[in-house]
Amino acid sequence: MQHDVIYAPEPWGLPLTEKLMPEYLQDLGYTTRAVGKWHLGFFKADYTPSRRGFDSHYGVWLGHQDHYTHMGYDLHPGFDFHRELNVSWEARGKYAADIFTEEAESIIQEHDAESPLFLYLAHISPHAPLQAPQDLINQFRYIPDRKRRIFAAMVTKVDESVGRVTQALRDKNMLNNSIILFLSDNGGPTNGFNGNVASNWPLRGGKDTLWEGGVRAVGTVWSPLLS
């Protein structure tokens, strides 16, 4: 996991000898749910999220796919949307960020608020390809560059998701006892593939490098429990 990302046909993944955080949390009595992107291996069932400490997973196994058709962009393209080990054809034509947000809301609504929950929500937005609902893109007409308009719309979708999930926790009376972590997984790609044109200045390098521009990502934590 230190030299490159996993491409669709590759027979490897995060080693099974590694005990992951959701597995530790299961030992402590948590219900563990994963929604969205996995991208840690799936060439065998034991490498998929529902075998790596999550009680359930709804989302994608790969790291690069169409936000509406959910067709992978890797060397051997194919439909990539699953609930556990089952293909979820019903996701076709729906925007991924909306699907993930709705699933997260449902998990919270159906959860027993008296028991602990770990919810891992991994959006694929604003990862390439640059796609977003047209009505949302139109709200950014003042941005001259079309790619930047789409990117702004994708970021807005993530922002909406954070708000909706937070509201779901509030409605369930779980927010006051929750810890929310929001973070990225890597620096921006600077090579321009599929519309990605990022700058990590003043840091050197970008995604797929070991320079700070590739590995130093932002994150924040929020909770009413923190003073």
Image: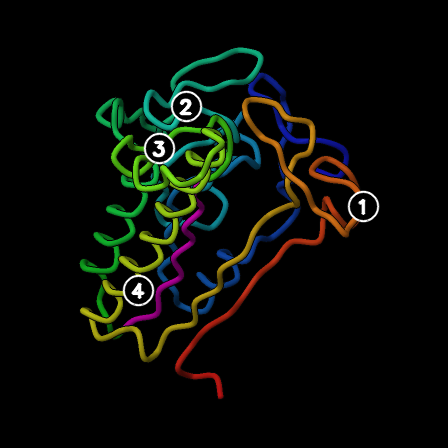
Q: In terms of sequence position, does the residue under pointer 2 or pointer 3 come before the other?
A: 2
Callout 2 amino acid: Asp
Q: CA distance from mark 3 to mark 1?
A: 30 Å
Q: CA distance from mark 2 to mark 3?
A: 11 Å
Label 2: few (<14), some (14–19) or many (≥20) C-alpha neighbours in 10 Å: many
Q: Which residue is mark 2?
A: 66
28 is higher (above) or lower (below) than 202: below
Q: In terms of sequence position, does the residue under pointer 3 or pointer 1 come before the other?
A: 3
Q: Which residue is mark 4?
A: 166
Front residue of 167/27: it is 167
Q: Which residue is mark 1?
A: 204
Q: In terms of sequence position, does the residue under pointer 2 or pointer 1 come before the other?
A: 2
Residue under the image location 54 percent in, 66 percent down: 220
Callout 3 amino acid: Ala
Residue 32: x, y in percent? 39, 56
The N terminus: image quadrant: top right
Q: CA distance from mark 2 to mark 1?
A: 29 Å
Dot 4: what SS? helix
Front residue of 177/73: it is 73
Q: In terms of sequence position, does the residue under pointer 4 or pointer 2 come before the other?
A: 2
Quadrant for residue 114, please give it: bottom left
Q: Which residues are magenta?
A: 115-124
Residue 177: mark in rendering: none
Q: Which residue is mark 3?
A: 132
Callout 4 amino acid: Thr
Label 4: few (<14), some (14–19) or many (≥20) C-alpha neighbours in 10 Å: some
Nearer the observer: mark 4 or 3; the answer is 3
Q: CA distance from mark 4 to mark 3?
A: 22 Å
Nearer the observer: mark 2 or 3; the answer is 3
